[in-house]
Image (spheres, grey):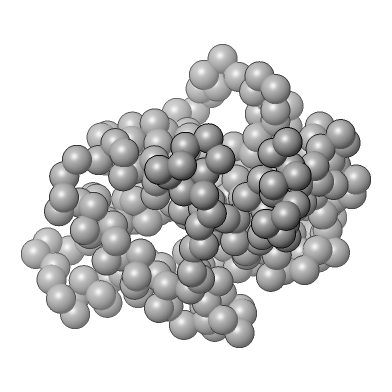
Amino acid sequence: MNRAMWEQLERHFGIESEPGKDLGKEAVMSIKGEDLIDVAAMSGFLAAYNQLIEGMDEGVAAAYFSSWFGSVIAALHYSISVYDTAPNFSLSNLEVQLIKEPGFTKVGFRVERKEAEQAPDDLAGRQRQQWLEHVLFHFYRNTAHPLMESLAQASSLNIGLLWGQLPTALNNYRERLQQSITDEAVLKQLEADERFVQALPSEWFGRSKNPFHVNVRYIPNPLDPEKQLALKNVCCLQFRRKNRSYCYTCPRLTRQQRAEWKI
């Protein structure tokens, strides 16, 4: 068991791995990941979540769920690049929780067993690529794809919008990691593996296009002219929550609307 890896997954991505550990937070609902493949169970989970975030319909909760699921995907990519290890994020090993934080409710993820697949020693070139294909195919076909399908059916939300939340989530984690990781070799490996994921066959995701093969667009940061803000890949539907509006980085907003939004 790679203790350091699990500690980093909790630190950077909020993936919990200790039974009964709640870090002082209140889990208002918990469900096994494999149960969420049942559309009725997913509908119940989304209804509970939607009530807590005051969404106009379950589509809002589904979009937010997908965004939070980005933490699992980012954790997998990080572990592969940094530790040459793929944690067991199968649905049968995941517990999904609604956790109340100060001012918001998040979807949290906990592994029931600290299981992981270590890459064979001395992998390089084509051998490492084959191992990557193996672990990524297993995750995207058997965990991410069925979860997204269930989310779409339970919420009646376009599945493309659900997949579309993930590039934004990964970009947010990427920016944080770039600020905390100083090893250039690790950063280069993260970038190389990210390009590898972007080139995976679209069929692995059940889509006509790989959902991670996107270009990140940037706009000026109104608070710091020397910096830029990344636009979200798709709308997160925040405007469909009670007393909420579009995000400043929503791709649906025009330049004029942002200018008015700032005033």
Looking at the picture, how far across and down is residue 195, in whole percent? 34, 70
Total marks drawn?
0
Q: Quadrant of residue 234?
A: bottom right
Give the farthest residue toward the top: 24
Image side of residue 49 versus residue 108, left or right? right
211 versus 175 height, above or below: below
In the foreground, 240 or 30: 240
Specify whether 138 is left or right of 35: left
Q: Residue furthest right?
A: 56
Looking at the image, which residue is at 56% across and 15% down? 24
Position of residue 203 relative to residue 183, above or below, is: below
Query: Could one spot residue 111 in this view of the protein?
Result: no
Identify which residue, 262 or 176, lies in the foreground: 262
Q: Quadrant of the C terminus?
A: top right
Image quadrant of residue 45? top right
Residue drawn where x is 34% and y is 51% of the image: 78
Q: Where is residue 34 drawn, in percent x and y?
A: 64, 54
* Residue nearest the viewer, comparing 247 with 49: 247
User: Is residue 80 shown above or below 48?
Assistant: below
